[in-house]
C-alpha cells in the first residue's frame, strides 16, 4: 500500500512522462494551425504542415487524407479561406506593390530638332563673333581709350589683354554649356529645357535693354536678330508637341 501523495504508474496525472510506455497513443499534431476534431485526424505521420489545417467541418473522413507533400499549394485554397501567413499573392491586395506603366517615349518632334539646332548655331556664332571682335585690336583699343581717357598706353594695353582673356574664357564656357544643353534637350531632359528657358529669358531682357540704348545701326541689327532667335527657341521648346515629347521621357516616380 502506498502512502498519500506517492504517485504510481497508473496515476493519470503522470501520463505522457514516458511516451514509450504508451505505444498506442496517437501522434500529436505539429505546432501551428487548428488540429482536427477527435476521431477525424489522419494516420500518424501524415499531419499537414503547420498552418495548413482545413477549417472546422471540412476535414476528410479518416483514411482519406492526402499523403505528405500533396496538400494544396498556396493560392488554391477554397473560397472563404485564408492562406497561411506569408503566402499572400504579391501585388493583389489593395493595389499595393503595383506600379503604373511608364509612358511610351515619343520620337523627337521637329520643333525640338529646330530649337536644338538654333541653340548650337547661336553658340557657334557667338564664339566666332567674339573671336572676330578680339582680332580687331585697333578697334578694341580705341574703344578702351574712349571709355577711359585718363589711361596711359601701358594701361590700355594691359586692359586689352585682360579683356581678351576674359572674353575667350567666357566664350568657350558659354559655347560648351549651350551645346551640352542642346544635346540634353534632344534627349528629352526637361531640366535642360527649363535651364535653357531661364538663360534665354535673361538674354532677351538684356537684348531689349541694349536696343534701348545708343549704338551703331549694325550692332542694333545684330541684336535684333539675336533677340528673335532667342524668342524662337523658347517658343519652339514649349509648343505642345515639344511638351508631349519631354513628358514622355520623364522617369516615373514611385
Image: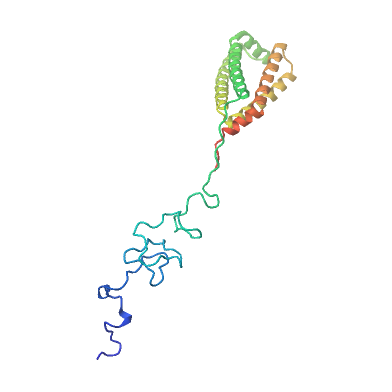
Q: Nearer the viewer, residue 69 or 40?
A: 40
Say above or below: 65 vs 142: below
Residue at (32%, 81%) from the top-left corner?
12
Question: Can residue 198 be seen in this snapshot?
Answer: no
Task: Classify residue 59 as left or right of residue 151.
Answer: left
**Would you identify the image quadrant in which residue 68 lies?**
bottom left
Please tell me how many numbered marks the rendered image carries: 0
**Would you identify the image quadrant in which residue 140 lies?**
top right
Check the picture and name the quadrant holding the C terminus: top right
Q: Position of residue 71 (x, y in %)?
A: 39, 58
Q: Position of residue 130 (x, y in %)?
A: 60, 15
Check the picture and name the quadrant holding the N terminus: bottom left
Say above or below: 59 vs 239: below
Question: Can residue 109 be seen in this snapshot?
Answer: yes
Task: Classify residue 220 as left or right of residue 6.
Answer: right
Q: Position of residue 99 (x, y in %)?
A: 53, 44
Q: Position of residue 40 (x, y in %)?
A: 39, 69
Task: Classify residue 137 as left or right of residue 89.
Answer: right
Say above or below: 19 vs 238: below
**Would you identify the image quadrant in which residue 119 lies?**
top right
Q: Nearer the viewer, residue 140 or 220?
A: 220
Q: Nearer the viewer, residue 44 or 58?
A: 58
Q: How is the image coloured?
A: rainbow
Amino acid at each position: 500500500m502506498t502512502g498519500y501523495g506517492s504517485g504510481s504508474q497508473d496515476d493519470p496525472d503522470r501520463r505522457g512522462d514516458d511516451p514509450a510506455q504508451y505505444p498506442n497513443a496517437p501522434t500529436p499534431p505539429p505546432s501551428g494551425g487548428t488540429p482536427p476534431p477527435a476521431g477525424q485526424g489522419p494516420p500518424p505521420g501524415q499531419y499537414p504542415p503547420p498552418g495548413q489545417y482545413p477549417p472546422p467541418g471540412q476535414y476528410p473522413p479518416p483514411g482519406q487524407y492526402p499523403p505528405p507533400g500533396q496538400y494544396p499549394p498556396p493560392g488554391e485554397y477554397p473560397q472563404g479561406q485564408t492562406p497561411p501567413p506569408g503566402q499572400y499573392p504579391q501585388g493583389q491586395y489593395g493595389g499595393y506593390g503595383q506600379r503604373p506603366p511608364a509612358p511610351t517615349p515619343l520620337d523627337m518632334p521637329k520643333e525640338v530638332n529646330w530649337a536644338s539646332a538654333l541653340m548650337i548655331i547661336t553658340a557657334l556664332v557667338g564664339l566666332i563673333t567674339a573671336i572676330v571682335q578680339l582680332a580687331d585690336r585697333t578697334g578694341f583699343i580705341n574703344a578702351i581709350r574712349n571709355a577711359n581717357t585718363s589711361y596711359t598706353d601701358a594701361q590700355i594695353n594691359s586692359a586689352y589683354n585682360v579683356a581678351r582673356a576674359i572674353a575667350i574664357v567666357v566664350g568657350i564656357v558659354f559655347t560648351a554649356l549651350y551645346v551640352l544643353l542642346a544635346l540634353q534637350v534632344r534627349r528629352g531632359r526637361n531640366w535642360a529645357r527649363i535651364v535653357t528657358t531661364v538663360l534665354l529669358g535673361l538674354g532677351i531682357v538684356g537684348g531689349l535693354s541694349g536696343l534701348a540704348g545708343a549704338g551703331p545701326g549694325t550692332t542694333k541689327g545684330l541684336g535684333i536678330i539675336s533677340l528673335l532667335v532667342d524668342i524662337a527657341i523658347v517658343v519652339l521648346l514649349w509648343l505642345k508637341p515639344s511638351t508631349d515629347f519631354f513628358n514622355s521621357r520623364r522617369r516615373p516616380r514611385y
